[in-house]
Amino acid sequence: MNILKEVAKQFDVSKPLFVAIVDEDDGSIQFQLKEVYRPNPKAFADPIAKLLCHKYQETFDKDLKRFVHSFNFEYAYKDIMKDITLFYIEHTNLKNPKQSRLYKWLDLSYTNDMRHPASEGFIALYRYIHGNGGIGSNDMTVENVLAILELMKEKYEVKQEAD
Amino acid sequence: MGVFDDKKFEQLDYLTQITETIESELNGLLARLPDRIEFSAKRVGECVGTWSHFSIQIDSVVRDLMSPHNSELSYDEERRIVNCFKWEASPRLEYDAGTGQLTGKIALVKAVATLSDEELQAFMGAKGIDEVRMLNCGEAEQWNLERINEIIDVLGKRDEEKRNRSYRKKMRCIETRLKEIFETNEWRIRDMELANKVGRWICRYIEDGNLAALTNLCKLKIMTHDGNTPIYSMEEEK
């Protein structure tokens, strides 16, 4: 999942400076980060970076003595797949899209796995969809996306069967 | 020396004798705990977790302080000791986990040096009463009803309960009576350890018919008949 990891490198982390408050009620001293870094989706042009903004997590690494990213790329990838599937349902002309072979292939747990050989292709497709208006894209984009999905299915579904 | 002599009372100074101050290991423990503990940057650093916040709990710090003293405190006793401490921190307190620097000072200080008799009275006999409460009535069939009635007799004021056939109700009656004795200071026991033994003796006699336990209870009861002096100790049968 190198693409997602590469994109994640753009994000900053919080400075590990904690301020303390004495809580008289429960007799504890609470240390909170003075400034918490929260990435702003509007600050990024890349749709993948925008998506990762919502998945941003950081943890303190005691050895490195600083905060490090701790994204859950699995969830991010699942969101990408969910988004592509919704796009397909929205724009396909079929009466019952959930009965189509393409939908069933997209819905497979293997297809939704980050290790799927087409994963980088799906990420690129997500970028393409969101770089051209998202779910409300123009007809040209819709046609292209549906065609790409069909081709991907043919290629990888066959490959899977051959395996 | 008589059988009913209170050696501890005789050794007390005049002032303690007339004020009838409660002797308690709780105050002894409190005195042994440090008056002030400064928290270094290193110690704060040890508490940093993986998230954007962390806390230092007063009870866990005090519990650590108490652990070398091997004190077997009940939950309420432990809470009372913990409440004797408070944080003293600079208004601006910051910790930089990157450099390990602490700006400002933080210390745990003992705000209460000794527990008052009113506070200690609430803990008198409590551990023994807990043991009475915890006696497993599921094994009650093996107990002798007669022994329970004897205890009710010694404790006094609950004669009507002797006619009751329920083990559970009889034990509840003993527990209530013990609470009453200690809450009202009826027996004038002024030593926490001795007070806690009352419930333990009762349990030992009811469970195993331990005669030494019954003797101790009776001896203590007789000492209460004097009425003039508080009770700090007694010669115990082993």
Image (cartoon, helix red, strand yellow):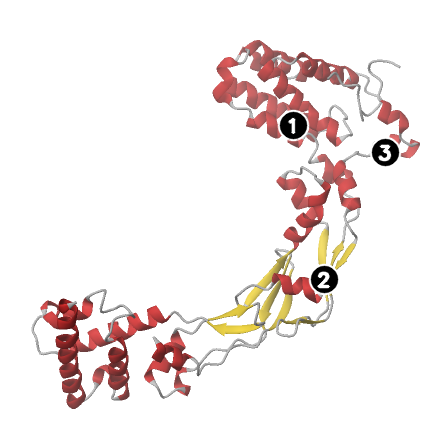
Residue B147 image position (x, y, % from top left): 60, 11
Q: State which quarter of the image contains the C terminus of chain B.
A: top right
Q: Residues within 10 Å of mark 1 (few under 14, many from 20)?
A: many
Q: CB atoms at circles 3 and 1 under 8 Å apart? A: no
Taking the spot 52% from the left edge, 24% from the top edge, the residue there is: B136
Residue A128 image position (x, y, % from top left): 25, 86
Name the residue nearer the viewer: B149 or A117. Answer: A117
* Image quadrant assignment for residue B108: bottom right
Q: What element does badge 1 sit on?
A: helix
Disc 2 and disc 3: Cα gap in Å? Answer: 39 Å
Left or right, B183 with reference to B116: left
- Label 1 marks a residue whose chain is B
Q: Which residue is mark 1?
A: B128
Name the residue nearer the viewer: A41 or B12. Answer: A41
Q: Amino acid at mark 2?
A: Phe
Q: Is residue A98 visible?
A: yes
Mark nearest the camera among 3 and 1 is 1
* Image quadrant assignment for residue A129: bottom left
- Label 2 marks a residue whose chain is B
Residue A80 image position (x, y, % from top left): 28, 75
Name which of mark 1 and mark 2 comes first in the sequence.
Answer: 2
